[in-house]
């Protein structure tokens, strides 16, 4: 499968962990237009917020696109809480390097099932995974700077 990671799974060590998708291979940087990165879910386990993409006109979310072997699909679903109703699979169209003439159709991502309207502050370690991935894949400096301003749980 082709997978668009926009949150903590952008971190190479996290996505390739044995309980996620050890077969993951980085393909490219991409954007999901008309969406915004938000923290709309509070993890019962961590008691802090987790990332989500929500429709937002004029905005875009940068992320990393990976090829993940089919045998890791269930493992990644489990890590993302698909079976518990935390996230659901969704197919989206992303664009290579934000170039609208280079779409990738039907790329899998995960979105929060029951979104909270107020910001659910993530833990610093969770945001660090997002930042680590964003820096590793060379996402634009202004996007990384915006990520650095996200309010974390105290």
Image (cartoon, helix red, strand yellow):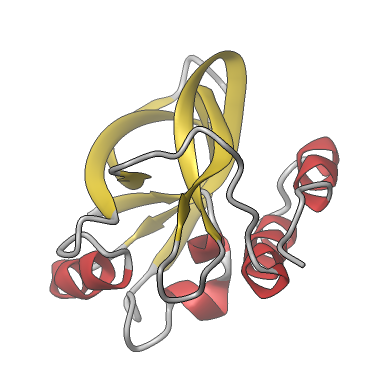
Locate residue 83 relative to residue 37 in the image: left or right: left
Name the residue: 34% across, 52% down.
Answer: 3
Locate residue 12 relative to residue 76 in the image: left or right: right
Q: Position of residue 132 (x, y in %)?
A: 70, 67
> Does the image show residue 102?
yes
Residue closer to the observer: 139 or 149: 149
Q: Position of residue 66 (x, y in %)?
A: 40, 57
Quarter of the image that includes the N terminus: bottom left
Residue lying furthest top in this view?
57
Name the residue: 56% across, 21% down.
Answer: 99
Q: Position of residue 139 (x, y in %)?
A: 71, 46
Q: Position of residue 60 (x, y in %)?
A: 59, 26
Q: Tell me if residue 113 comes above or below residue 152 in the rendering.
A: above
Name the residue: 83% across, 47% down.
Answer: 149
Q: Tell me if residue 108 comes above or below residue 93 in the rendering.
A: below
Locate residue 117 relative to residue 141 in the image: left or right: left
Q: Tell me if residue 56 comes above or below residue 134 in the rendering.
A: above
> Does the image show residue 98?
no
Name the residue: 19% across, 66% down.
Answer: 73
Locate residue 41 relative to residue 86 in the image: left or right: right
Residue lying furthest bottom in this view?
18
Q: Tell me if residue 70 comes above or below residue 60 in the rendering.
A: below
């Amino acid at each position: 499968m082709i997978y668009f990671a926009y949150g903590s799974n952008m971190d190479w060590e996290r996505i390739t962990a044995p309980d996620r998708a050890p077969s993951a291979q980085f393909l490219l940087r991409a954007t999901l237009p008309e969406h915004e990165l938000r923290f709309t879910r509070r993890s019962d386990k961590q008691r802090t917020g987790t990332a989500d993409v929500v429709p937002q006109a004029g905005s875009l979310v940068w992320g990393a696109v990976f090829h993940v072997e089919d045998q890791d699909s269930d493992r990644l679903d489990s890590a993302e809480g698909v079976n518990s109703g935390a996230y659901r699979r969704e197919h989206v169209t992303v664009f290579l390097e934000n170039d609208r003439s280079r779409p990738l159709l039907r790329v899998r991502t995960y979105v929060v099932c029951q979104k909270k309207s107020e910001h659910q502050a993530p833990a610093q370690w969770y945001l660090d995974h997002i930042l680590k991935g964003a820096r590793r894949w060379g996402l634009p400096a202004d996007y990384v700077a915006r990520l650095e301003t996200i309010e974390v749980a105290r």
